[in-house]
Amino acid sequence: ALGLLYLLPPLVALKGVVLLGALAAAWAWRGLGLAPHRGAALPLALGAVLAALLPAGSGALRPSEFKELPQLLQVQGVRVLEERWSPLGWLTVLESPRVPFRHAPGLSLHAPAEPAAQLGLLTDGEGMSPIVGHDGRSPPVYLGYLTSALPYSLLSRPRVLVLGAGGGAEVLQAIAHGAATVDAVELNPQVVELVRERFGGFSGGIYRQARVHVAEARAFVERTPERYDLIQLALLDSFGAAAAGVRSLAEGYLYTVEGMGGYLRKLAPGGMLAVTRWVTLPPRDALKLFATAAEALRAAGAPDPGAQLVMIRSWKTATLLVRNGAFSPAEIAAVKGFSESRGFDLAWYPGMGEGEANRFNLLERPWFFEGAAALLSPEREAFVERYKYDIRPATDDRPFFFNFFRWAVFPELVALRGQGGLPLLDWGYPVLVATLVLAVSASALFILLPLWAAHGDHAGGLSRPGERLRVAAYFAGIGFAFMFVEMALIQKFVLPLGHPIHAAAATIAAFLVFAGVGSRTSASFARLLAAHFPGRSPVAVAAGCIAAIVLLYVLVLPALFVPLSALPQGLRLAAAAALVAPLAFWMGMPLPLVIGRLDPQLVAWGWGLNGFASVVGAVLATLLAIHLGFNAVLVLAAVLYLAAAAVAPRGAPATG
């Protein structure tokens, strides 16, 4: 499916899914022996008709009305110029000649010129990244009046690396400020093709003036030998999505302690990392970013992290600078002058006093300065714990940078719903909890209840309470454990593979294939073990191998991901599958090894409880990872496998 989606639009691919279902129905119909040739034609013809009736093209898609794309399309004169499809997203390029796009996040109110003409480039209907009109000669003046322009007031002819180049606005900003060289990193090759080829004339050929790399940002940083004067993380997500918290469960490996540590290692002496985020109130993104950067500096051995940090804000964006070394007095003076001339507020610089904050874009209190000062103080942990939102530094083990939800603030915001409190709530986490409740309810209704109706206490196989309890504990345990391992590894492999779609495709496919191989060979393994090591339980041996591999992966995978990230995409996918293979092989054994021992009356319960745990476990794994981290989820899975082996139902060993 991953490969086909590079060739076919999703709705066309869905026609193939319908046809595959029709072919499967036809094959099953033949197996029933009911007029095989004529019988098979009926479901196949029905499937073909359904596939033909499925609408093709993007017009059939109905994105959420709260996304940017549907709202923009309501503006008079807006039209779609181009669309592209791939597993990395649905790209849409919009033109608005009558009401021009003016995408300039946090633009200074002192800007002497309005933004240049723009085309809107959206991914999956949101996160607009503008393609800025440029004649190739005079750069747009407004680009110097964004908070993201701050580092160019401190650096002369810097060597610049832009991560997440998108439509190229940050690349043009670097060129406009006289960058000596510009490296632009963009994950989606279709974005690069649109900006460089399809709209190259409109954009002034900016992607021909920079060295463009199609790669995942962290992977590129790990493998490049270059050192840069400025590494800039582009602001690509939409403010609406960020403010609503709808991305709170998305991995944010760009904004982790380990990620920032990698960027800092690629800075030249005196070089700077610049990260721009949206200003949300009360402060969330900016303070979590500040906390993560400070922790990355501490991990790198910085004696005084505050001396290497500067943060300013406008009415809508905040930009954080992290310097390789302490800021000099001349640089601090330049930061003050830049902010003063543009009406930007100082949030932090080394030696800053509270009276210098909150001068232009007034807040009730100087929250950003107070937060930054607290995060650098000895009481930072207490401040983080009592803060209304979760602003703990994100890590590769807990890469949920966009999750700010705290249960403690939930009743307060609900109580203020009549005064507009609910928009301050990050909805991603509550939706996940609601999903867990729905998963438990639906699984109980559609799996456990029918089992109870068909195989209640009157069934002979269930007349032994001890055996029934063993069946329940064993099959539920291995169901939860399997999903915990699978979900945790999918999330972990996002880092080296560069995108959740790639991670899911490689990991799930490897689990299905190699767990199937393990299941197929489980009976042979049991016989071999009995012949050479009589008395050893094959279930216990399999569970022990799983636990050992899981614990080994907890220790070694982070180190393996660095060299893995430097490989070409195809080799990375193959390497991920190879790493999953030995673990999946053993994980395929526990279920068939015990199914062969069960009283036939208990087999249905075993399958049903395993299915219940699998459905619920997929959601529960993510919930646990948010609180404990992926490594803790993996360790818990290892414990569950060992516990399940200890309570495995007794009976005759599997023979076939």
Image: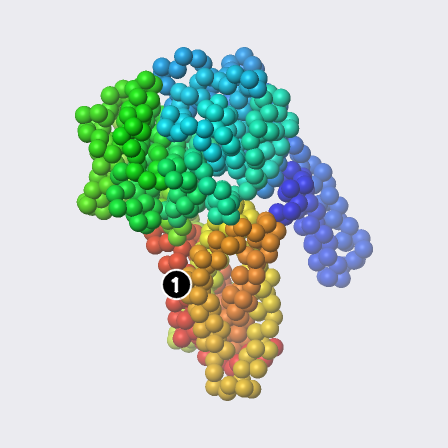
In the image shown, does 267 or 118 lie closer to the viewer?
A: 267
Q: Is residue 137 visible?
A: yes
Percent across and percent down for residue 104 are 44, 22
Percent across and percent down for residue 579 are 53, 61
In the image shown, does 354 or 390 lie closer to the viewer?
A: 354
Report the quarter where the C terminus lies: bottom right
Q: How many marks?
A: 1
Q: Is residue 602 visible?
A: no
Which residue lies under the disc numbered 1?
635
Percent across and percent down for residue 346 are 28, 27
In the image shown, does 71 or 338 lie closer to the viewer?
A: 338
The colour scheme used here is rainbow
Amino acid carrying mark 1 in the image: Val
Answer with the quarter of the image where residue 279 lies. top left
Q: Is residue 190 left or right of residue 533?
A: right
Q: Is 196 located above or below residue 246 in the figure?
A: above
Q: Residue at x 61, y 35 (%)?
A: 190
Answer with the quarter of the image where residue 634 lies. bottom left
Q: Is 548 located above or below residue 142 in the figure?
A: below
Q: Residue at x 64, y 27 (%)?
A: 198
Q: Is 122 located above or below residue 426 in the figure?
A: above
Q: Residue at x 27, y 38 (%)?
A: 307
Q: Residue at x 41, y 71 (%)?
A: 642
